[in-house]
Amino acid sequence: MHRSPFACCFLAISLSLSGCGILSGDSDRQDTDEAAQQARWSEASVKQLRQAIDRRAVHALDRLHFEVEGQPDTAAGQEALTRSALRYAKAVAQGASDPAKLFTIYTVPGPSPDLHRGLAEALRKDKLGEWLDGLAPRDVNYTRLSRAYLALRNQSEAAGADIPNTAVPLKPGATDPRVPAIARQLVASDYLDPSSAQGDGYSPAIVRAVKHMQADYGIKPDGVIGKEALEILNLSDAERARALAVAMERMRWLDENAPPTRIDVNLASARLTYWRDGKVADMRKVVVGKPDAETPQLGSPIHRLVANPTWTVPRSIQNKEIEGKGAGYLRRNNMTWKDGWIVQQPGPRNSLGLVKFDMKNEHEIYLHDTPAKQLFKEAQRQRSHGCVRVEDAVGFATMLARDEGILDEWQKARRTGKESFVPLPREIPVRLFYQTVLFDDTGEPVIRADPYGWNDRVAAAIGFPANESPLLHPSASDMGP
């Protein structure tokens, strides 16, 4: 078969598509060859690629170097240009880093655009720049993050250098222009009531909030805001820009076409959002894994509700927290030995509470109720052994059962007082992800602390200097999962 000199530059594209099962049969291969022959690189398309890469700060990718290699007048040059374009396209569409390589466990579904076909089509129509710009998440929050990142970048360039806010400690009773920003951060992290975030005086209410935060992070709770506390609060331009860039990268990892009915759990803020038919139906607090027992980033569906669950204590908890406590402890906690395992029987004191949301994953991670209701009052709720405890879990289960048309079965199962399983008529996807940037009522991004320190590795992967975030050191915990 005759192949024009420039067609071979898209041979790799055709092979890749075939290997992924996208191409099937001679007709598909012929269509791809024809598309490739119409998709020749030109000087104009090379210019569009360079211009798009020059604008990469819009995606907070300006700390990475994207080489434009090759010239359009040779077959080898065509191939090199294709590789250059695909590398940048992938960074914009799916992230410049691979979360599965950054984290031991990461199974949250991501986007899977057909970049090879898209590139060929964009070249054929001479709309490469437009195509590249359209690959980024279309979520309005991505645009807000981009706008805030560019503003910080331009501000730093205008000032000549970033001026850190860590020079002078802030003591109780002082008046300081940093106080409003500190108060906003404390409100965003649930340490401070919005009504107390007034003026630039370091008031007793703000001092109490700071002491609470200091205790959570293992800092002497004296209310003096020094370098460590300011780092947690992300007040310097450099820290804020870094957090915004990481947030954009994390958004690029997520599938924009997520199921319209799903449950999203943000591990960093310990908050759950229930989406029903594309709209937010419910939001509530959760308790997630503490540092050193972090809840992994998973995509895993709920397939059934469990009323009055038993809890088989994992070996790790049994060995570290129960072993040696004696038969009296087991009786008080309604626990028995069964086949070499400690099993806690159903009841309000069961560590799973009165409902378990069974999920399909090999890591034994699931959502559940808890008798430790006081933990929902904490600002930082990273305090479990890895599973996700849901505020008013019984009410949430009732909501799901009603929405799924199994309310009668669910209520009957609850009344038995015994462990009972109620399958869902369809699985409800759950995404457990980590995002330290939230948005206030006006749509402005608000940067929370990084309790697991997971932003550091992402920041390094997109070109930011090495840094080590302060880690949460929660004192309140229990033996529950």
Image (tube, grey):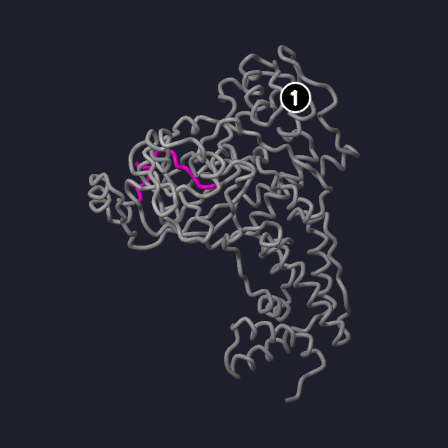
Classify residue 16 by image quadrant: bottom right
Give the amino acid type for the residue marked by disc 1 in the picture: Arg
Q: Report the front residue among 481 and 154.
A: 481
Res. 432 visible in picture? yes
- Please name the residue shown 44% across and 43% down the image: 314
Quadrant of image for the N terminus: bottom right
According to the picture, the residue beneath numbered tag 1 turns out to be 178
Q: Report the front residue among 332 and 81.
A: 332
Classify residue 135 by image quadrant: bottom right
- Please name the residue shown 69% across and 51% down the image: 55
Residue range highlighted in magenta: 386-400
Horizontally, is 449 left or right of 358 in the view?
A: right
Q: Residue furthest right?
A: 160
- Please name the residue shown 59% across and 76% down the image: 35
Q: Report the front residue among 35 and 410.
A: 410
* Residue 24, x across and y down, in percent: 50, 78
* Residue 412, x across and y down, in percent: 20, 43
